[in-house]
Structure formats: C-alpha cells, structure tokens
Image (cartoon, helix red, strand yellow):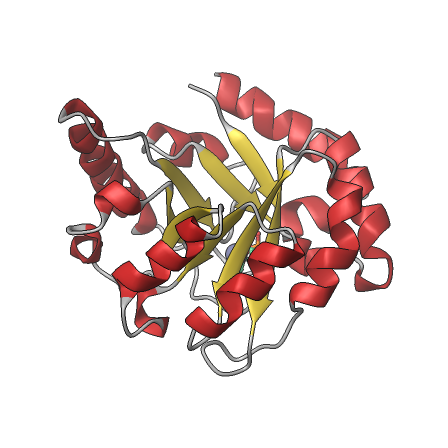
C-alpha cells in the first residue's frame, strides 16, 4: 500500500507560505493540502485562488490538494484549476448538482473528489463512484484546525474502504481514501488499518518544531 501525507497549510505560518511549502516538502510531505473556507459554508475564512497561484511554484511536482469549503462551488472551480489545483474536492451539500460539479472539475483536467462531513452518509457516493478520484472523509467538523479526531470515523473509513474495494473488483477505477482532521502520530496507524491511504495533517506537523521528525514518525507508524 502506498500512503500519502498531505500537510494542511491551515496551520502553517501565513506570513511565509511559500517557504512553508518548500520546508514541508523537503521534510518528506507528498502533497500540499489547501483549505479554502468562505465564512458561509464553514464559519471561517482562509484563502483563494490568488494565494494558490502564488505558492504553486514552491510546490514543484507535488500535488496541490485543494479542499473547497465554499458554497456554491461551481463558480470557483475554474479559478482554482487555473491557479494550479491538481485535485479539487468539495462537499456535496455545497453543490446543487453534484454530478455536474464533478464533471466541471474533470473537464478542466483536474482530479476530482467528494468530501463527506462526519454526519454525511456514504450512500451519497452511490451514483458517482465512476467519477471519483478520491473520497475525503472529514474526521472533524470542517472549519478549524487543531480539533480532535472523531472516533466514529474509523467505522466510516472501513465502510468506505469496502465500497472502494467492491468498485475496483467490479472493474471500476481505483479511488483514493483521504482522512482530514485530528490526524496525529498516535492515531495514523489505526486510521490506515481502517482503510485510509491518504492523510491530511495540519497542526500535528506545522505546530511542531521539526516537520521532518513528525513526518518520519508518521511513516514509521504506517510501515508497521
Ligand atoms: C478543517 C480542515 C482540515 C484541518 C486539519 O476544516 O479541512 O484540513 O486543517 O487540521 P488538523 O490536522 O489540525 O486537524
Ligand atoms: Zn481540509
């Protein structure tokens, strides 16, 4: 199993985002997770496509994993695609027409994914599995970094893994399974055992003095 670690810039130093991207990739991160919040879909406000465009050159070939917590989503998709998003994920509750929004993302050449809040059931995925490159399960309620992992997410992760495996067994494409919120050194192995392959970690990495030490310890946990 290949695991990916996607540090969330939400907990990075906003006064030096480019440097933070360089440093966290040098520390061994695979992707960069970019949390877009609009103070409408979620009660917080972060950054938009201009900031993404400014930091993109610092990311080299690393995937820009853009998590849209905005409503409505469609009008912003092309701006983020042009600004350098590689993966765009959104919350189905924030789109009137989920299938159309997924299609917009794919038409712009990006990978597409859906984000499920803790209380959003998995059956919302039923009729769009063919269009998904990734499923992102929120393990906290969206809006803030530094919250505690909601344990019920482990059951949901196992159920999502079963769905993906059944989809692949039936001839479908592979779909990545990402977990976002409260991921730490001491729970990452349990989350991986439940079936996740991609991990967002914000405060666990950026609030630590040594990013590489945290990422190395996370990888050591995943290797066990
Ligand atoms: C929450 C964001 C997360 C958050 C993760 O709405 O989507 O990406 O920044 O932060 P930690 O790892 O600190 O829970
Ligand atoms: Zn996120």
Going 35% across and 50% down the picture, which residue do you hit?
Answer: 151
- Residue 190 in the figure: left or right of residue 36: left
For ligand 1, give the image quadrant.
Answer: bottom right
Q: Nearer the viewer, residue 8 or 206?
A: 8
Q: Is residue 161 above or below residue 67?
A: above
Residue 187 shows up from this direction: no
State the image quarter where residue 26 is shown.
top right
The residue at the point 65 percent across, 68 percent down is 48
53 vs 5, nearest the viewer = 53
Q: In this rendering, does residue 10 appear at all?
A: yes
Residue 161 horizontal/vertical position (percent): 26, 35
Above/below status of 59 relative to 138: above
> On the picture, is 98 further left or further right than 110?
left
At which x and y percent is residue 140? 43, 60
Say which residue appears at 49% left-offset and 46% top-offset: 109
* Quarter of the figure with residue 220: top right
Q: Quadrant of residue 139?
A: bottom left
Seen from the viewer's position, the closer of residues 18 and 202 is 18
130 over 16 or under it: above or below: above
């Amino acid at each position: 199993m290949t695991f990916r670690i996607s540090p969330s810039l939400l907990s990075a130093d906003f006064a030096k985002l480019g440097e933070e991207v360089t440093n966290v990739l040098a520390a061994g991160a695979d992707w960069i997770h970019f949390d877009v919040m609009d103070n409408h879909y979620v009660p917080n406000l972060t950054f938009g496509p201009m900031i993404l465009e400014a930091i993109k050159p610092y990311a080299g070939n690393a995937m820009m994993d853009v998590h849209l917590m905005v409503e409505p989503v469609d009008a912003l998709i092309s701006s983020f695609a042009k600004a350098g998003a590689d993966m765009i994920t959104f919350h189905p509750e924030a789109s009137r027409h989920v299938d159309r929004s997924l299609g917009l993302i794919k038409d712009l050449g990006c990978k597409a994914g859906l984000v499920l809040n803790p209380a959003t059931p998995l059956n919302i995925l039923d009729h769009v599995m063919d269009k998904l490159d990734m499923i992102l399960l929120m393990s906290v309620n969206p809006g803030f970094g530094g919250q505690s992992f909601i344990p019920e997410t482990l059951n949901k992760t196992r159920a999502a893994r079963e769905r993906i495996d059944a989809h692949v067994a039936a001839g479908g494409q592979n779909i990545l399974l990402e977990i976002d919120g409260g991921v730490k050194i001491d729970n990452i192995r349990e989350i991986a055992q439940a079936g996740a392959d991609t991990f967002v970690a914000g405060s666990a990495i950026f609030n630590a003095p040594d990013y590489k030490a945290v990422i190395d310890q996370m990888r050591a946990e995943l290797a066990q």
